Amino acid sequence: GVGLRLVELGVDVRARGLFAATALHWAALMGLARLAAALLDAGAELELVDARYDCTPLEWALHAWPHGTNGRRDGLPDVTRVLVARGARVPAGALEALTGPDDGVLRGILREGRDPSER
């Protein structure tokens, strides 16, 4: 899509927009795993927090899971997997908050990303 093309053209992947969030925050919220991976490959900051919610891109994706997104909810596990595989810190209490019947997929992904001493 357009986002991938912009990354290819060398857009500043660290630029901040609304809420001082980055394109990686928005890709995470919208469930766009391919875009998130491309942004990270181009130097996007994985643990940068926005100015309004004080949250990382992973936290934006986790928020979108139960609360909905205008993007691809079915893409949220994939984008979560990308972020965790790249080293995103799993927020405290994230696993405990995922108690719904559809939450097993995210719990599994987050468990893989936790520090072995916390598993």
Image (tube, rainbow, N blue to C red):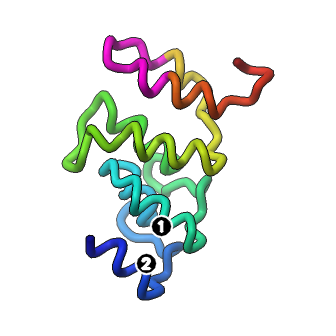
Within-10-Å neighbours for mark 1: few <14, some 14–19, many 20+: some
Name which residue type carries label 2: Val
Q: Are dots 2 and 1 in contact, CB under 8 Å?
A: yes
- Above or below 94: residue 47: below
Seen at 52% across and 15% down, the residue is 96
Image label count: 2
Give the residue displayed 40% in from the left and 63% down from the top: 35
Question: Which residues fall within the magenta stretch?
Answer: 97-107
**Residue type beneath disc 1:** Ala
Is residue 111 highlighted in magenta? Answer: no
Query: Relative to 11, is 80 above or below?
Result: above
Membership of 106 in magenta stretch: yes
Q: Quarter of the image holding residue 63?
A: top left
* Residue at (67, 29) in percent of width and height: 114
Secondary element at tag 1: helix
- Give the side of residue 40 with respect to residue 27, left or right: right
Determine if residue 71 is in view: yes
- Provide residue 97's location: percent of width, then percent of height: 46, 18
**Is residue 54 at least partly visible in the picture?**
no
Residue 16 coordinates in the image, percent (x, y): 46, 71
> Where does residue 72 sit, x and y in percent of width and height?
24, 46
Identified at 47% across, 67% down, the residue is 38
Q: Which of the marked residues, 2 or 1, is nearer the chain's N terminus?
A: 2
Q: Position of residue 6 (x, y in %)?
A: 37, 81
- Element type at mark 2: helix
Residue identifier under label 1: 38
Seen in the picture, residue 70 relative to 19 is either above or below; the reply is above
- Residue 7 has which mark? 2
Quarter of the picture holding the N terminus: bottom left
Depth order, front residue of 38/13: 38
Query: In the picture, residue 9 is in which quadrant?
Result: bottom left
